[in-house]
Image (cartoon, helix red, strand yellow):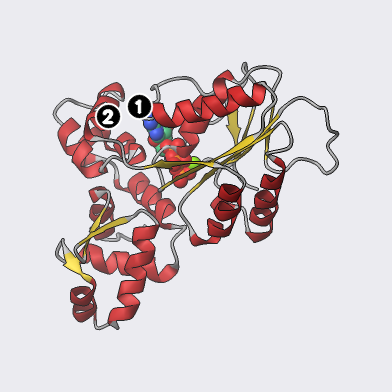
Amino acid sequence: MEVTAAGNRRHVGLIGEQRPGSAVLFGMTSDPPLVGRDGALACLRAAIGRLAGGRGGAVWIEGGPGLGKTELLAHALRDVPARIEVRSGPPDRGRAAGDRPLLLVADDLHRAGAAAVARWSRLHRRVRTSALLLVTAVRPVPECDGAYARAAACGAETVRLGPLADGDATELACLLGHDPHVVGTAVRDAGGNPAYLRMLAHGRAAPAAPLRALVADHLSTLPRRAREMLVLLAAAPAGITAAELAARTHRPVPEVRAAMHEAVDGAILTSAGGVVRFRHPIVRRVLRMPVTPS
Ligand SMILES: Nc1ncnc2c1ncn2[C@@H]1O[C@H](COP(=O)(O)OP(=O)(O)OP(=O)(O)O)[C@@H](O)[C@H]1O
Ligand SMILES: [Mg+2]
């Protein structure tokens, strides 16, 4: 399993590959504070509190790329009582009963591979009968739907992270020290996505290469046909339907529609009345940037 969290009260950090825009890893500080996620944080803290009292459980955190799943985990794991053991991923086989309460965290489950996802989902059978808390953070990908169904059947609480509300995004932009002249534009362009908000501190003058890398990472969990469709969509006039995009690009309507569904399910597009739009306008802008040879 790839990125996961481990730590105790004094040394909470996330171990794993650092990708563009990902949360600060080891030795994370509270700079800036977690904005706009009070309910989600309270849910995690309550589950951790129950675990401290010997009750297991599961929390499933789902949200699009860059919406703050890892950041939320990092904040929740900061004040885990010392008697709780915190580890990443599935435990060693045969862990003895009667050990300290165990908190297992799987961040980025969507990157874990089918076998690890299946093992993780099976673990949920144990949460009702042991002092085991399973916390999952995952992008919305169909590969993890089965695992989610299993977790939910075992009583997992679901936390869905959506874009930050405008007020929270504005607060975060100010905390991040954005130039007051660019706050409004940055909030609009980021569309509630804290990862983009961080990148847009310089407004439209934000450097292209890191932005491109971030968008590429965010689209990486979509099927290839959805990624290809997004490039075509970005080049088309805003507010277009599947049929219009299909006609423009000489592609079969069902294929374009299916790709759009994938991008909507992956939290990259929104859809209303048959019209699709980029959820975070900066993504469209980045996909429209001319590719310059390096
Ligand atoms: N609520 C928040 N308040 C302040 N900063 C945040 C918040 N959410 C996320 N961030 C910042 O935004 C960036 C992206 O957050 P994070 O890496 O947690 O997203 P993610 O959902 O885990 O993305 P991915 O799907 O790529 O793993 C990080 O720099 C993080 O510190
Ligand atoms: Mg993450």
Q: Mark 1 points at which residue?
A: 35
Residue plotted at (40% across, 48% down): 64
Q: Disc 2 beta carbon < 8 A from ligand 1?
A: yes
In the foreground, 250 or 240: 240
The amino acid beneath tag 1 is Val
Q: Mark 2 points at which residue?
A: 168
Q: In the picture provided, is 141 more to the left or to the right than 154?
A: left
Residue plotted at (25% across, 23% down): 174
Q: Earlier in the sequence, mark 1 or mark 2?
A: 1
The amino acid beneath tag 2 is Asp
Q: How far, Cα to Cα, is label 1 from label 2?
A: 6 Å
In the foreground, 247 or 156: 156
Q: How many labels does the image show?
A: 2
Residue plotted at (52% across, 32% down): 73
Q: Where is residue 118 in the image (x, y as percent from the top left)?
A: 67, 56
Q: Which numbered tag is attached to residue 164? A: none
Q: What element carries label 2?
A: helix
Q: Do the residues labelled 1 and 2 touch (CB within 8 Å)?
A: yes
Q: In the picture provided, is 183 more to the left or to the right than 124?
A: left
Q: Disc 1 beta carbon < 8 A from ligand 1?
A: yes
Q: In which quarter of the image is residue 48?
A: top right
Q: Where is residue 127 in the image (x, y as percent from the top left)?
A: 68, 39
Q: Where is residue 255 in the image (x, y as percent from the top left)?
A: 34, 78
Q: Is residue 228 visible?
A: no
Q: What element carries label 1?
A: loop
Q: Is residue 18 visible?
A: yes
